[in-house]
Image: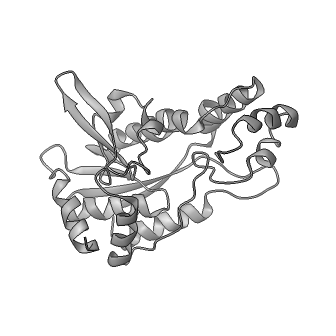
Amino acid sequence: MSAKKAFEGVLKLLPEPSSGRSRVLLGLSGGVDSALAGKLLVERGYQVNAAFLKVWNEDKDGAPCDEEEERRSRQVAEQLKLHDFAVYNRVTEYWNSVFTPFLDDYRTGKTPNADLACNRDIKFTLLSDESVRKKNDLLATGHYASIFTRRDGIHLGRGSDRVKDQSYFLSSVRKSDLEKVLFPLGTLQKGQTREICKWLGIPSWKSSRGMCFIGKRPMFSFLSQYATASLIELTLTFIATTEL
């Protein structure tokens, strides 16, 4: 399937804006997924405002974080002519709700997954609050997941791409925060996303798997700045096949 046909196909599957469901706050991350989500929403007729969450200032060695991702997000917002672009500094909230519990788990020999708490307590809770405060009707992200409704309410579903599917990492997001969420990429394969972005002229930045917002980095040396090295080494031995 050509990139054009794939784009047109997923566009038709995206709900049309309606009264009370036309203003969207889009969480931009500086990657191709959220960029394409924004393009789809604009083409579908939504009024799209963008938000970038800054949750990490710098490592103890002085290495800056978020700067490149913020620059890319601004570039996308300008390219797509989004109505607004806002940067929200949530460094304190991230430290208290995500990173400190993450370290506590390592110290007790557990194998934590920061993405679960990050999505639940930072991305969706804080962005949902900002969405309401800015009088947006909906919240959208570039996750590969889906939302469906049954008699008992809203449910989180898997994305069509079973390899890229991110529903597990969203599994602890509160239902109340999912009720007004859109996942425009839920029916796409990751490869299709890159082909569509190339066809549209959206920069296809390399994806980086890593700890939520902090990104991919040598986990042992990074965590050794914040916790006892021996405990981290013991814990990381059990998850040696996974680079968080």
Q: Position of residue 208 (x, y in %)?
A: 57, 58
Residue 107 lies left or right of residue 78; in this view the side is right
Q: Position of residue 9 (x, y in %)?
A: 19, 62
Which of the 4 image quarters holds residue 201? bottom left
Query: What number of labels is visible?
Result: 0
Q: Position of residue 124 (x, y in %)?
A: 43, 38
Residue 229 lies left or right of residue 170; in this view the side is right
Question: Residue at coordinates 24% horizontally, 66% vertically from top-left?
Answer: 6
Q: Nearer the viewer, residue 204 or 18?
A: 204
On screen, 199 above or below 109? below
On screen, 82 above or below 113? below
Question: Is residue 212 in view?
Answer: yes
Residue 174 lies left or right of residue 121; in this view the side is left
Question: Is residue 83 in view?
Answer: no
Question: Residue at coordinates 26% horizontally, 58% vertically from top-left?
Answer: 41
On screen, 145 above or below 14? above
Question: Residue at coordinates 62% horizontally, 43% vertically from top-left?
Answer: 91
Q: Quadrant of the C terminus?
A: top right
Q: Position of residue 136 (x, y in %)?
A: 29, 45
Q: Nearer the viewer, residue 19 or 206?
A: 206
Residue 139 lies left or right of residue 150; in this view the side is right
